[in-house]
C-alpha cells in the first residue's frame, strides 16, 4: 500500500479503492508536454486520483 507523507507537518495517509477495497498504489501519469504527475491508482483498474495534498503541497509517497 502506498503511504503518503507531508514533508511540512509529517502527517501521513493510506488510501483504498471505494469500489473493491484494494490498497491504492503509487504511479506516475505522463503528460503530453513531457511533465509527470504523481497519482494513486486502483490495482484492479477502477481508476486513479491525484495524490493527496497537505499544507498546500503534494504529499510524497514513502512506501509502495
Image (cartoon, helix red, strand yellow):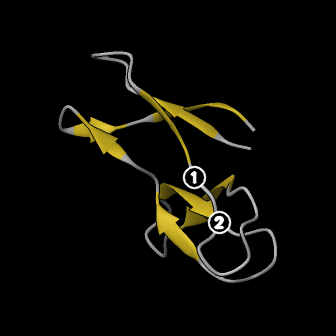
Residue at the spot 67% in from the left edge and 42% down from the top edge:
2
What is the total number of numbered labels drawn onto the structure image?
Answer: 2
The residue pinned by badge 2 equals 41
| Residue 16, percent from left and from top | 63, 59
Give the number of the mark in front: 2 or 1: 1
Residue at the spot 57% in from the left edge and 72% down from the top edge:
48
Assess disc 2: are there few (<14), some (14-19) or many (≥20) residues with their C-alpha within 10 Å of its C-alpha. many
Q: Residue furthest right?
A: 44
Q: Would you identify the image quadrant in which residue 18 lies?
A: bottom right
Residue 57 located left or right of residue 41: left
| Residue 29, percent from left and from top | 57, 65
Residue 19 located left or right of residue 58: right
Q: Decide: is 6 above or below 31.
A: above
| Residue 17, percent from left and from top | 63, 69
| Residue 10, percent from left and from top | 38, 16
Mark 2 or 1 closer to N-term? 1
The residue pinned by badge 1 equals 15
Give whichever of 48, 33 is nearer the camera.
48
* Separation of marks 2 and 1 at Cα, in angstroms: 10 Å
Element type where label 2 sits in the image: strand
Give whichever of 64, 16 is nearer the camera.
16
Amino acid at each position: 500500500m502506498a503511504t503518503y507523507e507531508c514533508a511540512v507537518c509529517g502527517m501521513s495517509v493510506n488510501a483504498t479503492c471505494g469500489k473493491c477495497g484494494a490498497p491504492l498504489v503509487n504511479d506516475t501519469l505522463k503528460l503530453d508536454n513531457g511533465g509527470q504527475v504523481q497519482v494513486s491508482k486502483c490495482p484492479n483498474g477502477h481508476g486513479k486520483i491525484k495524490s493527496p495534498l497537505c499544507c498546500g503541497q503534494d504529499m510524497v509517497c514513502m512506501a509502495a
